Amino acid sequence: MAVNLQIPDASDIHAVEGVEIGVAEAGIRKANRRDLTVFRLAPGTSVAGVFTRNRFRAAPVQVCEAHLATSGPIRALVINTGNANAGTGESGLAKARETCTALGALLDIPAEQVLPFSTGVILEPLPMDRLTAGLPAAIADLKAANWETAAHGIMTTDTLPKIVSRKVQIEGRTVTLTGISKGAGMIRPNMATMLGFLATDAGVAPALLQSLVREIADVSFNRITVDGDTSTNDSFVVMATGASGVQVQATTDAAYAPLREALASAATELAQKIVRDAEGATKFITIRVDEAGTQDEALKVAYAIAHSPLVKTAFFASDPNLGRILCAVGYAGIDDLDVTGTRLWLDDVLVAAEGGRHPDYQEADGQRVMKQAEITVRVALGRGTCRETVYTCDFSHEYVTINADYRS
Amino acid sequence: MAVNLQIPDASDIHAVEGVEIGVAEAGIRKANRRDLTVFRLAPGTSVAGVFTRNRFRAAPVQVCEAHLATSGPIRALVINTGNANAGTGESGLAKARETCTALGALLDIPAEQVLPFSTGVILEPLPMDRLTAGLPAAIADLKAANWETAAHGIMTTDTLPKIVSRKVQIEGRTVTLTGISKGAGMIRPNMATMLGFLATDAGVAPALLQSLVREIADVSFNRITVDGDTSTNDSFVVMATGASGVQVQATTDAAYAPLREALASAATELAQKIVRDAEGATKFITIRVDEAGTQDEALKVAYAIAHSPLVKTAFFASDPNLGRILCAVGYAGIDDLDVTGTRLWLDDVLVAAEGGRHPDYQEADGQRVMKQAEITVRVALGRGTCRETVYTCDFSHEYVTINADYRS
């Protein structure tokens, strides 16, 4: 029951010149599932990524960081579902490296030019034999027009594939951006989210791409949360092939700002799709905090609201039990918050001001907004000019069902 | 479906000399419910309390703090359910004061000698007329043997009353301790919890009682969590009548240590009862973090595990999906955590060590422990000698049902 999650028509999903994708059924955890995806990138492609800050970083995350740090080119990505290869110690690391070696041998590139990604159950050994046995089929499937298949290939508890694709004009040339993401639970990205892959045929100097991907993650994947659980495997990767002829070498280049805007917009849409398809979600909630003294303050308040099980179940019930939102603002961790300066809106409805319920607030108005599938909560703190926005969802029976049954 | 929540036999609930309690049905929110409770305390009783650190402190919490700060005696408590009188601004404050004035007039004591408490829905005006109309019936009911009735009188979504009562020998005299608590959701006390009242016939100097109540709260009510939501109304109050003849004036007195231990033990049991009766709880989980570098580190890890919806739903399902616990340890906020020094036990079963699954760990062993109603998670961080213990519960369909329906 995803919330207004659009899947583009096949004709609106644009291939990115320089990127080929192949998908196979390797039977990593269950049979008859597309669970193995390979990206092959043309020479000259810049690749940068950001990864989870969870201290239990999965083995593939550690290998990705090591391979990106070599400053050599990245020519391929390999993604498996069904097993996270996290909490697997030294043997898990060896398997992530072995995956790169196996794919490198088949594509005739060094192992260091491959980035590995895994998603699925934590604390289980990765079945290497099935993974490597599946690689030839994925390679045989490599083609530019495979984005929708890849969006399916990286799904776990996702109910729908997540794809954005658009063409923008930059410096008189057409630049294509196409990306996919996955994730529905264990979502509170810290640097990046579960898995997000965004490609463009603009060219970007590698060092610049690395700073750009961090900036973009901070307005997109790092601003969504489903359950507050920062995964061990979060990875967000941007690939810039340069095939469009548009090249960005420095932030002062004319093409930089429009490309940054286009990438950030595409990444935000990919991130929001994860919330729209969050486990059990029936509502898409935007939480905007204004008038904070610092960005950190704004984020604390936004996440306190976004993570409150009481707020989330009230949204699920369409119950304007809005004192729960004030309560979350109050415990968000701003020790010197003067609540008399705080105001709360639900969409356009002013609910509370001066530390209490606003005299004009009518329950019927709150009820009207709560019944919507998309709701904006706005809190003004009266402390400054900083502002942050976080995207989340409600908390339903279905979330419990999915997470109580995930492994069975 | 409370988890091993014992209700003492009536013969094991001991009155505390100097404390009388009366309960009435005032119809605050719903008819035919005991929703108004009055405590009358004998002259010479010391009273101290700790209250929520939520910045949206409820009106009665603010009035309690003001009245305790007068350093005059406290002679009465008045507690209503059905309405939290929180998020109610200036008019809510006036109503909390008016409640004290009304009860004071009936008991012939100044308003400043009354402490008011409210629990229920936030952001709704307190129906003063019904509350004051109910006071005479509560006063008519005042008697020493009313603890069990009072435990019912302060319940909201609680399914069972919460009472501890015991007699201990101190300095050759018998000292009685009896207390009640309530709370099942919006539970992550910060200073104290929803409502806890603990009385003893030992005598304690007022200033000493205030420092004692803080210490006790920090090992009892401040170590439980249900959903991470710190309420606007948390209050924990200790009353020491002195009627037993045991008197404590300073921490160096011989009676201090045994009395502190007895109070802390009773408060911990009262606090644990809240977790045992938590909304939808089917399991009682003890989370112990050892070998932390600081207490704060230990608490961060314990609460990250205790608040993870993924961990809590796995407990509900009795599913040993224990990678979710490692994941929570990893995102708890210890930036320099070396996961290779971390170990995880489920009761006596060693699950993970050296950053991954322990080679001897068998899923069947994890499964055996997960099926129990009471489970201890133990994490050793390998960083120092600090230790903390937090008590929580699982996360079930029933929690969603209760909180989606709470106001209807």
Image (tube, coloured by chain):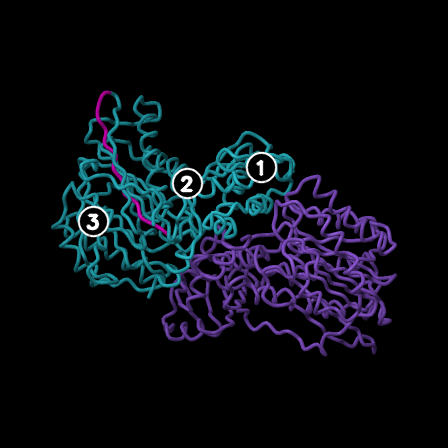
Chain colours: A cyan, B purple
Is disc 1 placed on a helix, strand or loop? Answer: loop
Residue A373 lies in what quarter of the image?
top left
The residue type indicated by label 3 comes to Val
**Closer to us: A405 or A336:** A405
- Rendered image: mark on residue A361: 1
Residue A28: percent from the left, percent from the top?
A: 24, 61
Percent of width and height locating residue B109 = 87, 53
Q: Which mark is residue A38?
A: 3
* Image: magenta residue range: A172-184
Between A170 and A67, the residue placed more toward the observer is: A170
User: Are the residues tagged 3 and 2 within 8 Å (C-beta)?
Assistant: no
Chain letter, disc 1 residue: A
Q: Compute the Cα span from label 1 to label 2.
A: 20 Å
**Mark in front: 3 vs 1:** 1
Name the element at disc 3.
Answer: strand
The residue carrying pointer 3 sits among few (fewer than 14), some (14 to 19) or many (20 or more) residues within 10 Å by Cα, namely many
Mark 3 and mark 1 residues within 8 Å of each other at the beta carbon: no
The count of marks equals 3
